[in-house]
């Protein structure tokens, strides 16, 4: 009887471990964010959100990024980009800095979408806006300026010397080299998606063979050594 009881206890413990819920991966989104729902895209760096279903609409200025104003080159493209990264009706995670509002009464936040993409950074990295310091809110300004340098070097969008309509195609970003062994020390992998289309919608890609470990996740149909071209 004693052996049977012991076995039963061990079996129950194993079941408890086996079926314990796994916490969702959220390493790409920092702690302290507030969940809200996007209700309107105002322009490339401004959105309206609600923190509760019946709560008031809050106008949000995205921190440390400045996109072209209405009537300027790349305004429409920047606005469309935010709409892709933060679709109306979908969740957004917002992180405040030290100063919660600007002089116009807009709430100041950094934003991450449902896929964990840092929206402010994405806009700067791909040339939709400039890195700008909203003192004293400087939490990510070093990163933003580094991303701006990459976009400027690659002549992306606002740095291309052309407007968004017509003209030569905008150059495709060259990814920052990463370790070639997935999971190795210092590895910084993008989130894996089912298809390149989903990766592009999340603001990711392209990936190059022998440079980006993410290349192996997707099918290189044309065999050119590059996958997930936007």
Image (spheres, rainbow, N blue to C red):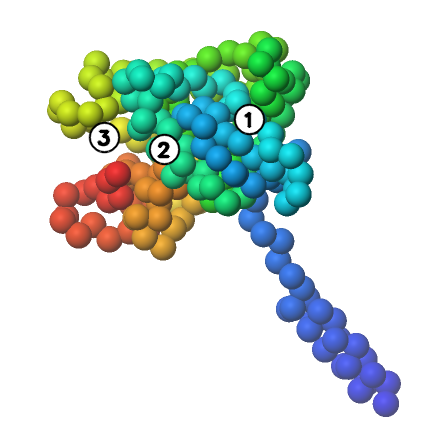
User: Where on the picture, by quarter, is residue 164?
Assistant: top left
Does residue 8 lie above or below 108 as drawn? below
Callouts 2 and 3 close, C-beta under 8 Å: no
Q: Residues within 10 Å of mark 3 (few under 14, many from 20)?
A: some
* Residue 124, image x, y percentages: 39, 23
Q: Residue at x 61, y 17 (%)?
A: 105
Q: Which residue is mark 1?
A: 60
* Residue 24, image x, y percentages: 58, 52
Earlier sequence position, callout 1 versus callout 2:
1
User: Where on the picture, by quarter, is residue 29?
Assistant: top right
Callouts 3 and 1 close, C-beta under 8 Å: no
12 relative position to 218: left or right: right
Q: Residues within 10 Å of mark 1 (few under 14, many from 20)?
A: many
Q: Residue at x 23, y 30 (%)?
A: 172
User: Where on the picture, by quarter, is residue 54?
Assistant: top right
Q: Find numbered disc 1 in the image and state the secondary structure of the residue it sits on.
A: strand
Quarter of the image with the C terminus in it? top left
Quarter of the image with the N terminus in it? bottom right
Q: Which residue is mark 2?
A: 81
The residue lying toward the viewer, choosing from 148 and 114, is 114
Q: Residue at x 40, y 36 (%)?
A: 83
Q: Residue furthest bottom?
A: 1
* Residue 171, image x, y percentages: 20, 26
> Is residue 150 in view from this perspective?
no
The residue lying toward the viewer, choosing from 75 and 56, is 56
The residue lying toward the viewer, choosing from 85 and 43, is 43
Q: Which residue is mark 3?
A: 172
Earlier sequence position, callout 2 versus callout 3:
2
Callouts 1 and 2 close, C-beta under 8 Å: no
Disc 3/disc 1 C-alpha distance (Å): 30 Å
36 relative position to 133: left or right: right
Q: Nearer the viewer, mark 3 or mark 1?
A: 1
């Amino acid at each position: 009887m004693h052996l049977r009881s012991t076995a039963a206890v061990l079996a129950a413990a194993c079941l408890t471990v086996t079926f314990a819920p796994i916490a969702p991966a959220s390493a790409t989104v920092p702690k302290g964010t507030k969940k809200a729902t996007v209700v309107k895209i105002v322009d490339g760096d401004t959105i309206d959100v609600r923190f509760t279903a019946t709560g008031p609409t809050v106008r949000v200025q995205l921190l440390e990024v400045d996109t072209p104003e209405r009537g300027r080159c790349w305004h429409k493209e920047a606005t469309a980009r935010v709409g892709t990264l933060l679709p109306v009706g979908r969740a957004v995670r917002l992180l405040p800095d030290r100063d919660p509002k600007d002089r116009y009464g807009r709430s100041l936040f950094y934003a991450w979408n449902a896929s964990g993409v840092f929206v402010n950074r994405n806009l700067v990295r791909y040339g939709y806006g400039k890195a700008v310091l909203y003192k004293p809110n400087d939490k990510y300004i070093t990163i933003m300026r580094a991303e701006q340098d990459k976009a400027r070097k690659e002549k992306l969008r606002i740095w291309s010397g052309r407007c968004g309509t017509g003209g030569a195609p905008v150059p495709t970003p060259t990814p920052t080299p990463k370790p070639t062994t997935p999971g190795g020390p210092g590895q910084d992998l993008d989130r894996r998606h089912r298809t390149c289309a989903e990766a592009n919608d999340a603001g990711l890609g392209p990936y190059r063979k022998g440079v980006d470990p993410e290349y192996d996740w997707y099918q290189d149909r044309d065999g050119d050594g590059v996958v997930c071209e936007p």
